[in-house]
Amino acid sequence: MRRPSLLGALLFAASLTHAQSIDSLAWLSGSWLQSTGNSQTEELWTAPRGQMMAGANTSLRGTRASYEFLRIVERDGRLLLLVSPEGRQPPTEFALKESGTSRVVFENPTHDFPTRVVYSREGDTLTARIEGQLRGQPRSMQWTFQRR
């Protein structure tokens, strides 16, 4: 059985840790929809331009609608996810924790909930997941979108 080289293992770990630039997240761009029963959630992401990707999420549950503005920005050599539920300012910042060819994790351990935001893509399916603790209990929510 062949063991992986130390250099190969280090290169693989580095590829999971930091995106080279915002361009490495182009796989996230597009129009994504999740529809179940009387609930519909849509998420839109622009292609990377000028060290930024802009996003918007709209949800409709019955007659109740909600929205949030999203941005991924390249600032001081780091990637940040900026989230503004209902347009609130200033946005909550989540720093890049790890990144691969079709998965990215952002974290803000000081935020109440969520503390982690995870996006992954397989083909025409995008999964978004938030994780953290509420009232001292682990909690997560997940959305599975299809490309529109």
Image: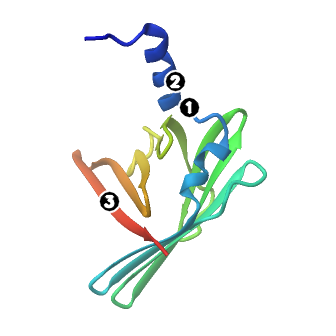
Residue 9 image position (x, y, % from top left): 43, 16
Residue to which mark 1 is pinned: 18
- SS assignment at label 3: strand
Which residue sits furthest right? 50
- On-image quarter of the N terminus: top left
50 w.r.t. 59: above or below: above
Alpha carbon separation for disc pair 1 and 2? 7 Å
Q: Tag on residue 142?
A: 3
Q: Tag on residue 14?
A: 2
Q: Is residue 115 left or right of residue 37?
A: right
Alpha carbon separation for disc pair 3 and 1? 23 Å
- Say whether marks 1 and 2 touch (CB < 8 Å): yes
101 w.r.t. 142: above or below: above
Residue 3 image position (x, y, % from top left): 32, 10
Q: Is residue 76 left or right of residue 125?
A: right
Give neighbour class at mark 2: few <14, some 14-19, many 20+ (Cα, 10 Å).
some
Q: Residue at x 78, y 51 (%)?
A: 50
Q: Residue at x 69, y 42 (%)?
A: 74
Q: Is residue 25 left or right of residue 59?
A: right
Residue 77 image position (x, y, % from top left): 70, 32
Q: Tag on residue 95?
A: none
